[in-house]
Amino acid sequence: MNVLIVEDDNALAQELALYLQHERYHCDFARTGAEASEKLYVNEYDFVLLDLGLPDQDGLHLLAEARQEHNSQASIIILSARGSVDDRVSGLQLGADDYLPKPYSLMELATRMQAITRRKHGLTQETLSFGHFVINLSERTLRHGGTEVVLTRREFDLLHYLLLHRGRVLTRMQLSEHIWGNMISDRDDHDSNFIDVHVKNIRKKLSAFDTHEWVETVRGIGYRFKPTQEV
Amino acid sequence: MKLQQKLVLLTTLSKALMAVVLLLALPWIVETLALGHTDASLRAEQQQVMRRIGEIGIASFLTEPNPNQKVHYDLLQDEFIDLRRASTPLPDTVATLPRQQHGTLVDFRVLRHTFQLQGQWYVVEIGKSIASVEDVYSLLRSLAAYALLFAVLTTLLIELGVINYLLRPVDQIVERLRAVQGPMPAPLPPLQTTTSDFQYLDATIRRMLQKIRRVFEQEREFIANASHELLTPVSILQNRFENMLQAEILPEEAEQQIVTSQRTLHRLTATLRTLLMISRIENEQYARNDKADLGAVLQEVVDELEDRIADEQLTVEWALEGRPHLAAANTSLLFTFFYNLLSNAVKYNHTGGRIQIGGQQPAGQPYRLQVRNTGRVIPAEHLPHLFERFRRASNVHTAEGYGLGLALVRTIAQFHGFRLQVESTEQEGTTFTVWLPTAELAA
């Protein structure tokens, strides 16, 4: 899939591209609004990752232009460090698909891009399963056989996120960015330590049904969802 | 009270006072004037009598059958002239005296004059009945009273009109100032007035409003720039760390160091975000468009914190009286406000402790919300500094924090017009009290 990264900071654009290429996206770059406008006119993209603070124009203009003039079908995600209160609202009103304030976790961005793609192609899965467990995403429930495993809201989010990235190590920072990313407060180590508490509780609840250790601790780094050999 | 009302009141009162004093003094003034007039006419008559006596001699007046006295009344008996011989000279006087007339006593204004003619003393008395004088009095009195009332009312009306006209710019200025909402008012056209004081006042106010507006705009721009300049490098670092962890070929030790760095960066991000948020709130970048049910917001925050509350085995006790609400609020800021208060109540509590969320509506007073926790006591000397940026009673609490949470709480409180207070005692624990603005109660 083709991604246009509209970002005036070269280093940031490179880091972004590095991660996305690893995720099998093809990345193109634009450093100014004019450049982006031209590329949008010539090429077709699946995603436009749009920084609002461009040197030559407001990214919101580009967004409106992309939607109205180029009739672009690309999914547009705003990545902004400007963080003005209205940006999010106006961005979404102008037709952006999502909004992430900088600094964001690349994993979070990739997850959201996947979700947008699935939604666009009608591939949204109602359920995910592991072992004899079934997660229902619309009901936000976890069942084992016919029995519901009662999870709190945050436990559900955490398990779902780990499951989406099964086999990969997620750091506490990535996890807490996902869980509390939008919440501005006096966030501190307490929050990331709390990931441990959530994981401990999830494990306890799962172990009542199954002896397999689904969520594995990677010492000093974080956690990994460890699938079993298919039964 | 408005200046115009005060001036109107003052003018009206002073006019009324003047009218009352003049109306009370009027009888005395008229009487004095009328008596003066009567006395003057009596003297003129006396001159005439004396001239007459000089012309035709005294003898023609004093004839038989009364050679000693001659009394003459005019036809209506309003006036008399009394001429008689006297043995000794009497002083000349003008006085009001009773006189017998048809068997009744009637008041006369009497002029008495003694004179000597050929060695003989004579007294002449000329009188005028008071009743005849009083007719003139009352006529004069009513004329004067009408004139006075007319004068008072006309001047009053004119003055009120002039006051109203002259002070109209003051009303307009006040109206304009009332209309100013927030620090970014639209520019105003100059006020139409010829009074130089008002022109100066208007120009100064407009200049000040523009200056405030400029400062706020500059600050807004600064915040946006600072935000971009600070958060972009942080983003680069955070993304680079994530990419490095992704590489999967790193030695374990290096991985752990990256994770530690990521953690430090996370702290920096949290601090930057909170600082920028405080600045944006102070820069009035948030709207107050929501009607907020505080009970619902609190419930949402408690739900958000349910895992921590459960983990610390805390009990949340609710005692909210009524339905505290705000008519003009920012719900997401309110959420952050209570989230910080309650996450503090969790963080600084002891395992198995309690969190009390209470609210009372004392009669005639603002609604009072209280969040109480059974954590350790905050020493009294720390309490006044608790809401300052980067201050933290660090020696008291075991949990970590960066000293911005409560500064953010204070900023959001100011944004909504709350009053905040914190108390901490051994028996009661630590209590944060929030007084909602009174204006909201009427809504």
Image (tube, helix red, strand yellow):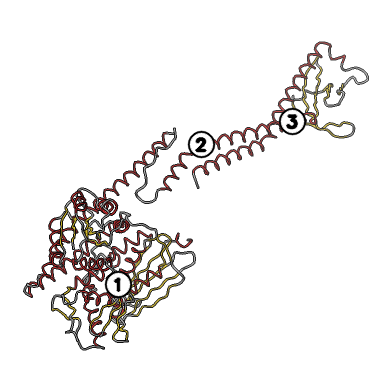
Measured from the top left, where is residue B362 in percent x and y? 47, 68
Mark 3: which secondary structure? helix
Q: CA distance from mark 2 to mark 1?
A: 60 Å
Q: Residues within 10 Å of mark 3 (few under 14, many from 20)?
A: few
> Residue under mark 2: which chain is it in?
B
Give left or right: position of B99 versus A94: right
Disc 1 marks which residue?
A: B343
Between circles 3 and 1, the one closer to the viewer is 1
Pointer 1 local density, CA inside 10 Å: few below 14, some 14–19, many at least 20: many
User: Closest to the observer: B430 or A203?
Assistant: A203
Residue to which mark 3 is pinned: B139
Labels 3, 1: one chain: yes
What x and y, as percent, mark residue B336?
Answer: 32, 66
Q: Are both tags, 2 and 1, on one chain?
A: yes
Across and down, in percent, residue B233 comes to: 15, 59
Q: CA distance from mark 3 to mark 1?
A: 91 Å
Q: Circle 2 is placed at which residue position? A: B165
Q: Amino acid at mark 3?
A: Leu
Helix, strand or loop at label 2? It is helix
Which tag, 2 or 1, sits closer to the chain's start? 2
Q: Picture coordinates of residue A88 (x, y %)? A: 29, 59
Image mark 1: chain = B
Q: Is residue A193 above or below residue B26?
A: below
**Nearer the N terminus, badge 3 or badge 1?**
3
Tag 2–tag 1 contact (CB < 8 Å): no
Left or right: A188 with respect to B298? left
Query: Would you identify the image quadrant in which residue A142 lies?
Result: bottom left
Closer to us: B291 or A190: B291
- Specify the subunit that label 3 lies on: B
Q: Amino acid at mark 2?
A: Tyr
